[in-house]
Every structure is written in structure tokens, then in C-alpha cells.
Image (cartoon, helix red, strand yellow):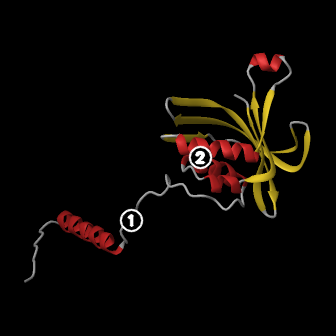
Amino acid sequence: MGVSLHVKSQEGRLMLRTWGLVLIACLLVPVGSMEEDSDTKTFGDLSAKEHCIRNYELGWNERDIDRLAELFDEQCVFWYRMNPEAAAEGKEYLKHDVDRELASWKSMFEDAQTIELEIGDGQWRGTSEVMGTPCPECWETDREYYLTISLATLVESHGRMKVIVRAVEQKYRIVAIIYES
């Protein structure tokens, strides 16, 4: 049983040939290979500074405390700018070490209904110190961030953060994060 089509005009034959090529192309292309993958985020291998930022964001969004722990240098420090009253008393920043920060996040991840962190784009530049402490061969970037956490109530935070990294054994590690607001 065959199908026979008679197309009289040159334009009709050209259209039929084009649709035939489209049909053949659709049959030859594997399913899913034409899907857009640009929204899919995966953890990077830390061979690039930017992987630290993206892995930090993804670690929060997936609540993956183990992946987050891999990002930090052993001596990593988190600095939080205090309110103006505390700053007037000489306490401009609150300082946490990485172990305290990870323990706090783990508890928050367990209690939160939803978490969404988005970190904006930024440029990297070399730096030689972090909050007055020498940091040879370090790089820093300033980024805007948006954090939404749904606990018993909705908590939203928006501000600027400075992330400082350095290469340790051919992989970048975060040595400090300074939350400016």
C-alpha cells in the first residue's frame, strides 16, 4: 500500500520537499537533544573562581550542606555588617567561623519550607588582604544577592556580599564572605 501525491506547481513541490526534510530531521534527532539546557544548573569542579559563586548558590537552593562545606577554606570567615547602633559602639562586623556557619545553615535547611538564593553577576579583581589580614594571591568580587526563606514566617533578604577566594591545590576555595547589608 503506497501513497502517491501529485503536486502540479513548482511552489507546491518545493514546500513538500521542505516538509519532507523537516520530517526526516525530526526522525534522526534524538529526543531531548533540542531541549534548552541553559536553565539547568550543576555543581562546578572549582577549577574556576565563578564555580565558587554558582556552587554556593546551588548548595543553598538544594540545601546541600556537604557541597557547601567543600567550598570553604579551613580558615574561612564570615563577616556580617552590624546595625548602625552596634557600629557606633565599635562593633562594625559580627564574625563567624565556617563550622559555626555550617551548623547554623544545617538547622535552617531542616526547618525551612522553601529556600531560594540568587546571586547576581560581578567582576573579579585581585586583592592582597581580607579585613586587614594578608591574603596572598586572593581574588574578590562584589555581588548583589536575594535570599528568600520560608520558615514559620517568610524571611527575605537583599543586599551586597563580597566573596574572596584563592586557589588551594589547583581548586578555588572561599576564604571569606563579607555581607555588607
Image quadrant for the N terminus? bottom left
Q: Amino acid at mark 2?
A: Trp
Q: Earlier in the sequence, mark 2 or mark 1?
A: 1
Which residue: 73% across, 30% down? 180
Q: Residue furthest left?
A: 1
Counting from the top left corner in percent of width and height, residue 177 is at: 75, 41
Counting from the top left corner in percent of width and height, residue 36 is at: 44, 57
Residue situated in front as seen by the camera: 144 or 7: 144
Question: Is disc 2 surrounded by few (<14), some (14 to 19) or many (20+) residues within 10 Å?
Answer: many
Q: Residue 19, relative to residue 43: is it above or below?
A: below
Image quadrant for the C terminus? top right
Q: Between marks 2 and 1, how big is the CA–CA gap?
A: 28 Å
Q: Amino acid at mark 1?
A: Gly
Circles 2 and 1 in contact, beta carbons < 8 Å: no
Counting from the top left corner in percent of width and height, residue 97 is at: 78, 43
Q: Residue 121, relative to residue 16: is it above or below?
A: above
Identify residue for label 2.
60
Identify residue for label 1.
32
Which residue: 35% across, 68% down? 31
Secondary structure at badge 2 equals: helix
Q: Which mark is residue 72?
A: none
Q: Quarter of the image holding residue 168? A: bottom right
Q: Quarter of the image holding residue 143? A: top right
| Image-based side of 113 in relation to 58, left or right | left
Secondary structure at badge 1 equals: loop
Question: Is disc 1 surrounded by few (<14), some (14 to 19) or many (20+) residues within 10 Å?
Answer: few
Counting from the top left corner in percent of width and height, residue 28 is at: 34, 75
